[in-house]
Image: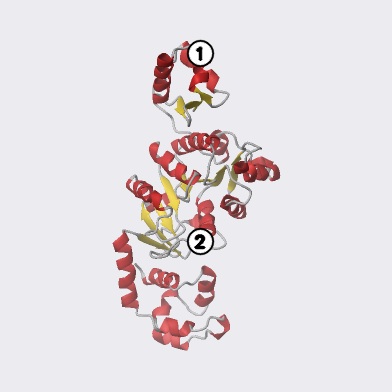
Amino acid sequence: MERAELALVWFDYSGFSMHKVEKILTKFNKIDNIFDKNIVKNAFFDDLDMPNLKSKLLSIDEEDFAKQVNDDLYKHNLSAITFVSKSYPEKLKNISDPPLVIYAKGDISLLTKKSISIIGTRKPTTYGKIVSEKFINELSSAGLITVSGLAYGIDTLVAEQTLSGGGKTIAVLAGGLDSIYPSQNKGLADKIVSSGGLIISEYRVGVKPANYSFISRNRIVSALGLGTLIIEAGKASGTMTTAKFAIEQGRELFIVPGNITSSQSEGTNSLIDEMPDTFTISPNRILYKLNIKKKTEHKSEKQMDLTETSILDILSAGEVSFDELAERTKLSASTLSSKLIKMEMFGLIKKGSGNTYYRM
């Protein structure tokens, strides 16, 4: 790690924000001068309103601190990408409050690739799950890296569905990378990394998630994507703050409409009402707006018989139960079950909760 990078890590470990660091650095010709005792002694900091700053800088033992950082990173198999690092993504540099340091585990090259941020409620309805799977599958199949916060609900679906489809995903945490939250997603975080994905945080190891850090985390989630897709969100949810960040950062916003009687869709429907251009019912609209071409598929098409075509037609209207399908197709339970299993294997339909089925 170069001295300039180590200097930024010191500021981060010491709890300084980017705003404060910018003020402090006006006192130095170059950032690593904070390690030069003579320069620090002669510097004037009284106008910065930062008590004890000089004594803190003079107390730095550069060698000991470098060892501490290297030990932390090695122990948890992490990388530290500072604002002055070559690998620091431009899309984060251009936001109003960029993180000083990004701690990362996995493939950091994903930070420079085309991504889509996908967010939503922590308690998705069956409708929300169906919509999520459809959009996640098609967007990641088109080559977009998905970005989420690894929380409950839609966040978890984003990671799981991307990985099951062979795509790559980035998870942004609200605490140090040694503190996976929720703890139930520890295995999922490990799978993201082992599958060629990436987990990142602006918080160093040992820092636990706090209420404010979830909100702070959201600005990074939105900044990493070319656009942000919202699937189900209540009116007072954290998702709404991420939408605000996306707008401030000049990112495209895509919102899937929801059931007007569902509290889980109050936020999303309200945003669409305020910004009609965000209305999105197809992944194709997102790909078109982001100028992403679908990858050519070489899979052989499944030839369907008349019965299977009929089942697809029935499911075009939405989720249907097994019993209703049996009644409408006039098929025996065993024959219908066989057809449904085959169609699910070919990715034509998906089984929902309560023995229901829907079209992909």
Find residue 196 and report its horizontal and vertical position in percent.
Answer: 35, 46
Kindly identify the amino acid type of the residue bearing the numbered disc 2.
Ser
Give the quarter of the figure containing the N terminus: bottom left
Q: In this view, does 5 lie to the left or right of 48?
A: left
* Residue drawn at x 53%, y 44% as measured from the top left: 123
Q: Could you give the CA–CA distance between mark 2 and mark 1, rounded to whole angstroms?
A: 52 Å
**What residue sits right under mark 1 in the picture?**
329
Residue 233, compared with residue 259, is above or below; it is: below
| Viewer-side label of 2, 1 | 1
Find residue 187 and report its horizontal and vertical position in percent.
Answer: 35, 48
| Residue found at the far right of this picture | 274
* Residue drawn at x 47%, y 65% as measured from the top left: 100
Q: Is residue 255 visible?
A: yes
**What residue sits right under mark 2 in the picture?**
213
Colour scheme in use: secondary structure
Find residue 127 and report its horizontal and vertical position in percent.
Answer: 55, 35
- Crowding at dot 1, Cα within 10 Å, few <14 / some 14-19 / many 20+, comes out as some
Numbered disc total: 2
Q: Residue 253 carries which label?
A: none
Q: Which of 109 and 13 is in front in this view?
A: 13
- Crowding at dot 2, Cα within 10 Å, few <14 / some 14-19 / many 20+, comes out as some
* Residue drawn at x 58%, y 24% as measured from the top left: 317
Regarding mark 2 in the picture, which secondary structure is present there?
helix
Q: Nearer the viewer, residue 229 or 248?
A: 229
Q: Can residue 312 be seen in this view?
A: no
Regarding mark 1 in the picture, which secondary structure is present there?
helix
Kindly identify the amino acid type of the residue bearing the numbered disc 1.
Thr
